[in-house]
Amino acid sequence: MIEQFQATFSDHIIAVEASDMPTFVIRKESVLPVLTQLFKEFKVQFLTDLCGIHYPDATPPMLGVVYHLHALTTNTRIRIKAFTPVSEPHFPSVVSLFSAANWMERETYDFFGIIFDGHPNLKRILNEDGMTYFPMRKEYPLEEGTRTDKDDAQFGREKIT
Amino acid sequence: MSVTLNLGPTHPATHGVFQNIIEIDGETILSADSTIGYIHRAFEKLAEHRPYYQITPITDRLNYCSSPINNLGWHMTVEKLLGVTVPKRVDYMRVIIMELARISDHLICNSILGVDTGAFSGFLYLFQHREKIYEIYEEVCGARLTTNIGRIGGFERDFNDTFYIKINEFLDEFSEALTEFESLLTRNRIFMDRTIGAGGISAERALNYGFTGPNLRAAGVDYDVRVMNPYSSYEDFEFEIPVGTNGDCYDRYMVRNVEMWQSISIIKQALAKMPEGPYHADVPEFYLPPKQDVYQYMEALIYHFKIVMGEIPVPVGEVYHSVEGGNGEVGFYLVSDGGRSPFRLHFRRPSFINYQAYPELIVGGLLSDAILTLSSLNIIAGELDA
Amino acid sequence: MSNLVQAPEGVTGQGFFLTSVEKAVALARKNSIWPLPFATSCCGIEFMATMGSHYDFSRFGSERPSFSPRQADLLMVMGTVAKKLGPVLVQVYQQMAEPRWVLSMGACASSGGIFDTYSVLQGIDKVIPVDVYVPGCPPRPEQVIDGLMKIQDLVANESLRRRHSPEYKALLAGYGIE
Amino acid sequence: MFSVYFPLLLLFGAVMLFVVATMGLTHLLGPKRAGTQKHEAFECGIPSQGDARTPFSVQYFVVAILFVLFDVEVIFLYPWAVEFKQLGWTGFLEVCLFSIMVCLGFFYLYRHRLFTFKK
């Protein structure tokens, strides 16, 4: 089945990763065509999950989006990944294919700042609208500074400036 | 002319903290727009700063009505990454705990649906038995709600005999109480008039919205992770998957009720066929050793120290594992770079995905149906804004 | 028979009982507190167990939870309060009629709990004055009832003129609540 | 003649006295803490937008009037209920006739689907 996918999408696929389910890394521009073709031909019509990922120390720091798809009829799960440099965080939105992706993309935008072109109303969903930075990126701290009871030196962590 | 109504964060009907701005003309709803994130606690960012076994307390605050399912789902994900296979006995123990958690989750949803249609006594009847489930949890892990049950590789202790007494007692009493509850609501004229046809969704739209769990089965699709990709030896048990027809509140209620009966029969089968053997896998470098060994043996102390400080050798790689939670497929997408804590951990949260279809379910319906649809979707705020 | 509600101090005569208005009002208020269950997350489910028939919260006179702040005496904040929910909490607190008390149930409401993250308000006492903190994550129903009994002691021993006192006004002014 | 009604007047006076006293006491004793936020309408904690005094659907009005209509008909049963024993069977038959006519009206409204909310 992996060979079948590789054959049909040979020009889009950049890499195939060995993992617990067939995993393909494809170019960012070909996300929509690949997913539409999967939807129509291979009956992969269920978007299980969509999430962002941030690789800060890749050569150009990369932002990625991971799509988990599931063909319910043949019970095959596929994971599709696509990456883009952090400086240019634009991705095609798949809301036209799966309405499930609406909030998932808003959450990925809210966390990583990935702008999904073609999304009906792309604004923050979980954080406050007035938030300026994208918290899930690796360079932002977890804690917010107002906590006084935890002395960082005790926990072997450097002071949050 | 339309009136804007705010079904806001502190509303008794939302059973949680999320907001809907509803445009109504008389009683019919013209449009709805929901805002969530009122208890967003940044679980995924928190998980990137904790060693593996410390993430379990986060997972049981995801869906706190059935927290053991998330705990054990998380343990299975890490075991899948580490390549640990647990003995049969642990699988059966996990099935019992997860089915108990499923009963407690469906129990809350159905009794609150009863409260929303005006039958308050059903809630009080069934909540008694939820206390009994809490007592059974206390026998296994000492906590009532945020259970933090089990460990990577098994359980911290075997089920003691009071557990078996309590669970058998619970199974008999709860079956009577459930028949009483069903005789109260299922063929109740008012309940049927209120819920049939309220907030229905077609199978095709439900699949497109990424529905899973009882809400999808109510729409007619028999997708259940326990059957589709069986985990923790679910294939050894026979149970049916209830399926509704037009996916409205009555079907969701019926699907959850029948699933409670199925869970009771699964627990009985698991108790009957419980195999002997160790209650944890023999993987000392991942499994936290029991306390008495740590105080006596040097190796146990070293392993304990290494696991607690988070230096367990985790292979680089990524894994996605999903379990059938109370509201649908609870998925854990774990990317590890071999470090002390996961590089990226994403939770597939069914309530977050089910709730985005809420405007489509209620537009055109009556306002009172909107309240019913909200509680029949069983949206849990912790899972919604993880 | 000692756990009956004790009569306040006063002069008992042949067929009558004399006590100060303050004590009589305090006795009435103490045993009829209407809670506003501001239930956000896991502590809310534990509060449902407390309201259930096993632990039965209404033995203490708070049978009727009022979800509107207008008829509520006790604001019970249960569960995590994110920063997005802060203004909502202050608005609900301000719209409660005097005299009002606040019980913060659970570690998340009292101090942000285990969620020291960018999006969580680290303790509701940063935005509203709190009378009783109930520790635990979630606290057992007995602890919640113990918290309510602490609130009842506060209600019983509070003088009617406390809300006019300068310290109280300074406390509210400190929170920017007029 | 006056002595017959005196206890009644006394009771009425006591009731009025109690009502005025408690209202006055709570008004005096209770702390008054006015505030702009407090006078806002309660919108589940969200600052309210828009105005509540907007025209709403007429179907509410129909339901309200029907309630008043049937409520008035219940009031006619009170005098019968008081003199239940003396009126005997004839009274009972008249009341049955009266309620049948009321039910006819109710059934007429039900058939015209006035109670269900039209979309």
Image (cartoon, rainbow, N blue to C red):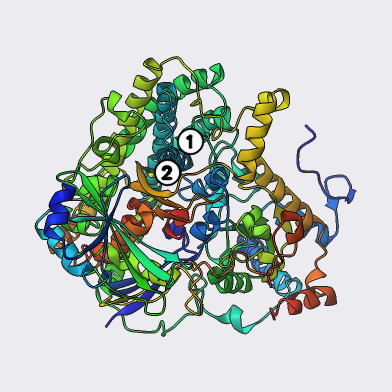
Residue shown at the point (73%, 48%) measured from the top left: C149
Amino acid of disc 2: Ile
Provide residue C114's location: percent of width, then percent of height: 62, 54
Q: In this view of the protein, can residue C98 be seen by the observer? A: no
- Say left or right for A145 vs C69: right
Residue at the location (28% across, 64% down)? A101
Left or right of B195 on screen, residue C122: right
Q: Label 1: how many residues lie within 10 Å, few (<14), some (14-19) or many (20+)?
A: many
Is disc 2 in contact with disc 1, using a CB cutoff of under 8 Å?
yes
Q: Are marks 2 and 1 on the same chain?
A: yes
* Label 1 sits on residue: B130
Q: How many residues crowd around disc 2 within 10 Å: few (fewer than 14), some, or many (20 or more)?
A: many
| Nearer to us in this view, B378 or B85 | B85
Q: Is residue A46 above or below residue B218?
A: below
Position of residue B338 relative to residue B136, above or below, is below
Identity of the residue drawn at 30% across and 33% down:
B183
Q: Secondary structure at mark 2?
A: helix
Q: Which residue is mark 2?
A: B108
Rendered location of residue A99, percent (x, y):
24, 65
Q: Is residue B211 above or below residue B84?
A: below
Q: Measured from the top left, where is residue C142 in percent x and y?
A: 66, 40
Gap in Å between the C-alphas at discs 2 and 1?
8 Å
Query: Residue B338 vs residue B273: left or right?
Result: right
Q: Chain of mark 2?
A: B
Q: Is residue A85 visible?
A: yes
Q: Amino acid at mark 1?
A: Arg
Specify which label sits upstream in the sequence, 2 or 1: 2
Query: Could you say which disc has been placed on residue B198 in the image?
Result: none
User: Measured along the vertical axis of the image, is residue B269 above or below residue C15?
Assistant: above
